[in-house]
Image (tube, rainbow, N blue to C red):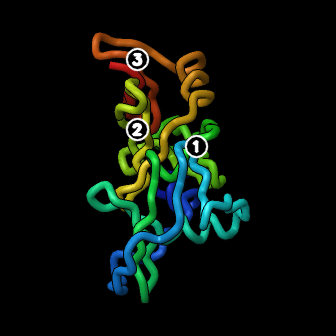
Amino acid sequence: MSSLSDLIAELVTPHAPTEQWSGQTCGMLDMSIDEQGRWFHQGGEIKRLGLLKLFASVLSCEQQRQWLTTPVERCEVQVADVAFLISSWYRQSSDDGEVLVAVDNLGRKWPICEQFPLLLRRFHQQDLPYLQLGRGLQARVSRNSYYQWVEELAEQDKQGVYICSAGQKYYLTQ
């Protein structure tokens, strides 16, 4: 077994050091991300996974605005909700107990823990779980993963229905 910090280092894809870059702001890019986490450029869907992962590695969210940042430019991207969806998950043992690992629509892995917590947020008049990814970014948990968690893992107390990961409770309802 390994520690949670070792697990994070092993699983989480590094992000570019965009906070160190101060490129010129170039306005709104003709790029958008729809509610299903599909990326579009000039109206056409971007389907090359390698290109999507490259864009994701330089994406950040500040004051509810999404930015693609390079050392030279910083361009805003239109995002309907969030750029990523949690499409699947699995369990991983660690020295800190069982950890749920969420997998996003780009195949990146995120251990649900204090560094990457779940939180409830309103979407289409429902409170849904979102995973905090860092740099202001979030991933909405897909309906399929949500129902699997409720069916297989959920417990309930007076505060609501929750799942446990890395020794922490994460509420799915309130």
Let me know if residue 69 appears in the view: yes
Residue 128 position (above or below residue 70): above
For disc 3, the neighbor class at 10 Å (few under 14, some 14 to 19, many from 20) is some
Q: Residue furthest right?
A: 48
Instruction: Kindly state the secondary structure of the residue where label 3 is placed.
Output: strand
What is the number of the mark on residue 117? none
Return the disc, 3 or 2, that comes first in the chain's sequence. Answer: 2
What is the number of the mark on residue 36? 1
Q: Quadrant of residue 158?
A: top left
168 left or right of 8 in image: left
72 left or right of 30 in image: left
Q: Residue furthest front?
A: 43
Instruction: Kindly state the secondary structure of the residue where label 2 is placed.
Output: strand
Write the residue at 37% across / 29% down. 169
Write the residue at 63% across / 49% down. 105
Return the disc, 1 or 2, that comes first in the chain's sequence. Answer: 1
Spot occupied by residue 108 in the image (x, y as percentages of width and height): 61, 55
- Residue under pointer 3: 161
Write the residue at 46% across / 25% down. 163
Quadrant where the C terminus lies? top left
135 left or right of 102 in image: left
3D distance between C-alphas at marks 3 and 1: 25 Å
Write the residue at 69% across / 68% down. 50
Of badges 3 and 1, nearer the viewer stands 1
Let me know if residue 1 appears in the view: no
- Residue under pointer 2: 118
For disc 2, the neighbor class at 10 Å (few under 14, some 14 to 19, many from 20) is many
The amino acid beneath tag 1 is Gln
